[in-house]
């Protein structure tokens, strides 16, 4: 049974399938904060939040069992994603469920602004019939400037094009092909600011977007231009915006999101008559709430049950079907990592993961993460490293990770090689998947071997002289250790040899010492591969 804390209310369409599944215990405790939240997180596997609950670094410290945070919505700025990554907690979001609603709200705000609907409504309610004061402008023929043209920005662009607007966008990550499909002209931020009749923001709140529309940027906008922000509050400098609206250097603005939410009752933004305000309503539709609830519930379910992190913002994106295909390779990757770490003497500076096989390029990243799980579990413990944080932990330790795709590799359809380098020593191990996903270790150092990567593996280097196998077998037999496989390899007769011996059970330390004392034996390592 997985325990899931529902910390913010999500639509029943998302909750019910989890409840009726039978494999989840739902803990419904809404509106928790601080210590109470920390305590509630202590014994759950997952937590689902919307934007109200803040998951901070401190709260995360208490989530000993926590593996998954699900955010029913797009923005994850209420979650300390870095802290989650460090702890190996996957942060999942529901990025597409509210796209249409947010795009429609943006258009509503645009229209409200150019036709001055809120002010006209206020005047009517006050008993007036004042047509002269509310002359507006058309959207038709105007230039809409977008900052960020992802899911929502893209949908806003489509709708704006339907209104006969020109759309110019600043989005350094948008491909020219997508821009062409959306009939968006790509430009620099400065050009967009200078050309837009209406500027609309659709970027996430990140280090690079926080405060990106400040005094200097507002000053570049046309006098009389309009601004819409239905993205995140921190993107616009609210104080500067207040000044520009009060001085009429901007004709008007519409904000759905704010630096501080709820917006304080006495906030200066509330006093501006050329500003339209809505209380973060972008996703506040029946459809969006149902969509994100269903989307996040499915994502949390798939992460807990199948290790499917395709919706994680902080892990390699691997979907359910891909995960099933990748599982044998990930298992092999981890075992090769364990083996490499056991053979290397602690120093870890570089890891190179080389792969030959049918998996797509983007799956090299999770494979590398799999190898690092093996390598780092000897350092930080197996439970502290997983697909979410393996690459991050490696980076934090200054380990360079390289991923290399090899051409077809001999007879092996699926071949994975790990090179672990540090302190001038290079350790190389490789494995392969044979028919039906059976994994084998096929290389240790320069030696070709063929053993199953399971249980206890003893790797023994010896001089290639007669009688070694017998003496090793006798020592193990006398200690009641059963040998599963014994693969002896050598480079040339009389030189160095290597034995990969898979045994049932674990060799006690005295037995390893006894093996080391055999005159022909140069080195003995034992590694537990599961
Ligand atoms: P998205 O990830 O699909 O798109 C964001 C776009 O911003 C991407 O194309 C990205 O390339 C671009 N971008 C990132 N950094 C940039 C930068 N420094 N400069 C320029 N472009 C940059 O996200 P989305 O689903 O379109 O959501 C956009 C915003 O809308 C987010 O901030 C989200 O939190 C917000 N949102 C608000 C509401 C609401 O209720 N008002 C609802 C949903 C989403």
Image (spheres, rainbow, N blue to C red):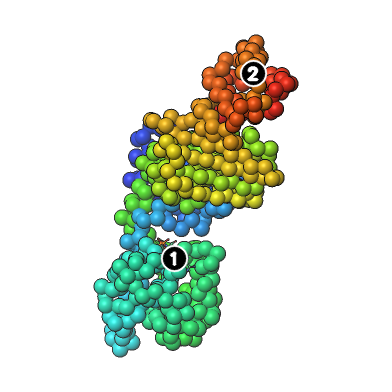
The local secondary structure at tag 1 comes to loop
Q: Looking at the image, do the residues carrying marks 2 and 1 touch, with CB atoms under 8 Å apart?
A: no
Say whether disc 2 or disc 1 marks the residue closer to the N-terminus: 1
Outermost residue on the bottom side: it is 132
With respect to residue 448, does 392 lie above or below?
below
Name which residue lies at 40% across and 44% down.
359
- Picture quadrant of residue 481: top right
Residue 376 on image: x %, y %: 61, 40
Tag 2, which secondary structure? loop
Which numbered disc, 2 or 1, marks the residue closer to the eye? 2
- Picture coordinates of residue 321, whole percent (x, y): 36, 41
Which numbered circle lies on residue 353? none
Towards the viewer: 402 or 219: 402
Please provide percent x and percent y for residue 438: 43, 29
- Which quadrant does the N terminus fall into? top left
Q: Is residue 178 above or below residue 46?
A: below
Pointer 1 residue Cβ closer than 8 Å to ligand 1: yes
Q: CA distance from mark 2 to mark 1?
A: 64 Å
Residue 530 vertical position relative to residue 217 in the rendered view, above or below: above
Q: Which residue is disc 1 drawn over?
A: 173
Disc ID at residue 466 = 2
């Amino acid at each position: 049974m997985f325990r899931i804390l529902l910390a913010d209310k999500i639509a029943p369409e998302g909750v019910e399938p989890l409840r009726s599944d039978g494999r989840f215990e739902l803990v419904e405790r809404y509106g928790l904060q601080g210590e109470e939240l920390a305590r509630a997180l202590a014994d759950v596997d997952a937590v689902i939040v919307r934007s109200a609950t803040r998951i901070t670094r401190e709260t995360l410290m208490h989530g000993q069992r926590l593996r998954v945070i699900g955010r029913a919505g797009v923005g994850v700025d209420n979650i300390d994603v870095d802290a989650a990554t460090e702890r190996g907690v996957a942060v999942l979001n529901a990025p597409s469920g509210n796209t249409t609603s947010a795009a429609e709200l943006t258009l509503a705000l645009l229209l409200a602004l150019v036709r001055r609907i809120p002010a006209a409504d206020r005047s009517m309610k006050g008993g007036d019939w004042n047509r002269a004061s509310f002359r507006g402008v058309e959207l038709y023929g105007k230039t809409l400037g977008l900052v960020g043209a992802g899911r929502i920005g893209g949908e806003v662009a489509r709708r704006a094009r339907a209104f006969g607007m020109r759309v110019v966008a600043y989005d350094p990550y948008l491909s020219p092909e997508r821009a062409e499909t959306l009939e968006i002209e790509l430009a620099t931020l400065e050009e967009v600011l200078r050309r837009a009749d209406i500027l609309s923001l659709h970027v996430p709140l990140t280090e690079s977007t926080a405060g990106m529309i400040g005094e200097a940027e507002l000053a570049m906008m046309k006098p009389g231009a309009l601004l819409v922000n239905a993205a995140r509050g921190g993107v616009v400098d609210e104080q500067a915006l207040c000044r520009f609206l009060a001085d009429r250097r901007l004709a008007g603005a519409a904000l759905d999101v704010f630096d501080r939410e709820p917006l304080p009752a006495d906030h200066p933004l509330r006093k501006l008559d050329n500003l339209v305000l809505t209380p973060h309503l972008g996703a506040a539709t029946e459809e969006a709430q149902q969509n994100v609830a269903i989307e996040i519930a499915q994502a949390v379910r798939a992460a807990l049950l199948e290790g499917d992190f395709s919706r994680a913002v902080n892990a390699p994106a691997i979907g359910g079907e891909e995960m099933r295909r990748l599982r044998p390779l990930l298992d092999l990757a981890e075992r090769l990592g364990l083996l490499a770490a056991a053979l290397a003497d602690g120093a870890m500076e570089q890891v190179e993961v080389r792969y030959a096989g049918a998996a797509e390029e983007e799956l090299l990243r999770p494979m590398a993460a799999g190898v690092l799980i093996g390598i780092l579990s000897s350092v930080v413990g197996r439970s502290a490293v997983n697909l979410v944080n393996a690459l991050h932990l490696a980076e934090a330790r200054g380990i360079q990770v390289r991923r290399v795709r090899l051409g077809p590799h001999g007879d092996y359809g699926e071949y994975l090689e790990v090179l672990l380098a540090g302190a001038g020593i290079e350790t190389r191990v490789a494995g392969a998947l044979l028919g039906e996903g059976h994994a084998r270790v096929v290389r240790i150092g320069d030696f070709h071997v063929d053993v199953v990567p399971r249980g206890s593996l003893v790797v023994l280097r010896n001089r290639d002289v007669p009688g070694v196998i017998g003496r090793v077998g006798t020592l193990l037999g006398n200690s009641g250790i059963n040998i599963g496989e014994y693969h002896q390899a050598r480079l040339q007769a009389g030189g160095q040899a290597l034995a990969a011996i898979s045994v049932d059970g674990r060799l006690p330390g005295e037995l390893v010492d006894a093996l080391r004392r055999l005159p022909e034996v140069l080195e003995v390592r034992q590694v537990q591969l599961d």
